[in-house]
Image (cartoon, grey):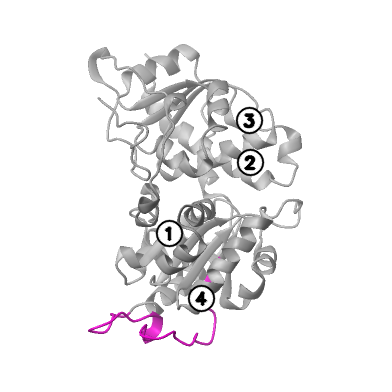
Amino acid sequence: MSSPSPASGPATSGPAASAPLADGADTAPLSLCAREPRVPADRLVAEMVPPPRFDSVRFDTYVPDPAQPSQSEAVRVLEDFAAGLGGTPAAGGRRGLFGFGRSKAPKAPAGPRGVYLDGGYGVGKTHLLASLWHATDAEPSRKAFGTFVELTNLVGALGFQQTVRTLSGHRLLCIDEFELDDPGDTVLVSSLLARLVEAGVALAATSNTLPGKLGEGRFAAADFLREIQGLSAHFRTLRIDGEDYRHRGLPEAPAPYSDEQVTRAAHATAGASLDAFPDLLDHLARVHPSRYGALTGDLSAVCLTGVRPVPDQSTALRLVVLADRLYDREVPVLASGLPFDQLFGEDMLNGGYRKKYFRAISRLTALARDAARLVDTR
């Protein structure tokens, strides 16, 4: 199977629809280290939609934990929120949220203009955020979904004023994984959101936790509302309790395979990549994290040999972003070397970014389970 040029590969497409080749057929695997993707600025807004993993999620596909009533309550509130964002533009001109005319600047309505989903990793915040996007009665071009990193990348590509103009006509902006640990970018995005609220755009967000918040619960609402400063009054907080759903009744992560098994599977799987883990970590330093989706979006599997502990925090944080993009796109990860729960040292798992690292371990473990089908154990 021929692959698209790394410079023009799809930024948000899902994994290639392929399976291991039959009868021992061999295909040369791709290499992530040979790719340096470029994403044109004019594609950034058009591709701000839920990632492939969340294409089909809806409120009725979210399965609340009966022991956690806050999950069912969150679904109810978000359904009502989505219903309040409906409406049809008036003939002869566009209309804003709740019927406000766009021929002149609307007066901001009273009450919260956004919702903030507050919970630990693995409780389904992104599922609910994507469900809100799908449930909002608007054309895809009038609602946007992206991570905090993708939003800051948009501002970098278009400029602040153009980003405001581009997004001001939207009915809804969903921001996943709001990065509270970057003060500069937090101020930038908070300023952007203030302008969008003035224009009548509804907001929905999830976030991570500030560095240094080690054992103070798994929730970040107070941090989020403080960091967005004057915007806090525009958000209603929905706390979502629960355990990481990826660990509810699931088997332990599969043990790593041998280098030979991983290499054989990469050659037998159309659209798979094959790289040595240390080489991949070096390559990630040369590709901006905002391009990791383009780096991996058309792959059917990622095969890695020689997984070992990540050497430093900068490298670890890049790997977290890669794990998020692979998980979003449902790209299985087959690996040799150490198991994924040994990627990050104790100093990292006890440090300020520990929630990011635990999320990466959880997601990579789920993708490792998905990759088991690629290995011929005969």
In the image, residue 95 lies in the stretch drawn in magenta? yes
Mark toward the viewer: 3 or 1? 1
Dot 3 corresponds to which residue? 343
Q: Residues within 10 Å of mark 4 (few under 14, many from 20)?
A: some
Q: Which amino acid type is shown beneath numbered disc 1?
A: Phe
Residue positioned 54% across, 21% down in the render: 279
Q: Are marks 3 and 1 in contact (CB under 8 Å)?
A: no
Residue positioned 43% across, 69% down in the render: 165
- In whole angstroms, how far apart are the C-alphas of marks 2 and 1? 23 Å
Q: Nearer the viewer, residue 62 or 206?
A: 206
Dividing the image into 4 quarters, which one contains the C terminus?
Answer: top left
Dot 4 corresponds to which residue? 197
Mark toward the viewer: 4 or 1? 4
User: What is the tally of numbered marks visible in this picture?
Assistant: 4
Q: Which amino acid type is shown beneath numbered disc 3?
A: Leu
| Position above or below: 184 against 137 | above
Q: Residues within 10 Å of mark 3 (few under 14, many from 20)?
A: many
The magenta region covers 87-116
Mark toward the viewer: 2 or 1? 1
- In whole angstroms, how far apart are the C-alphas of marks 3 and 4? 41 Å
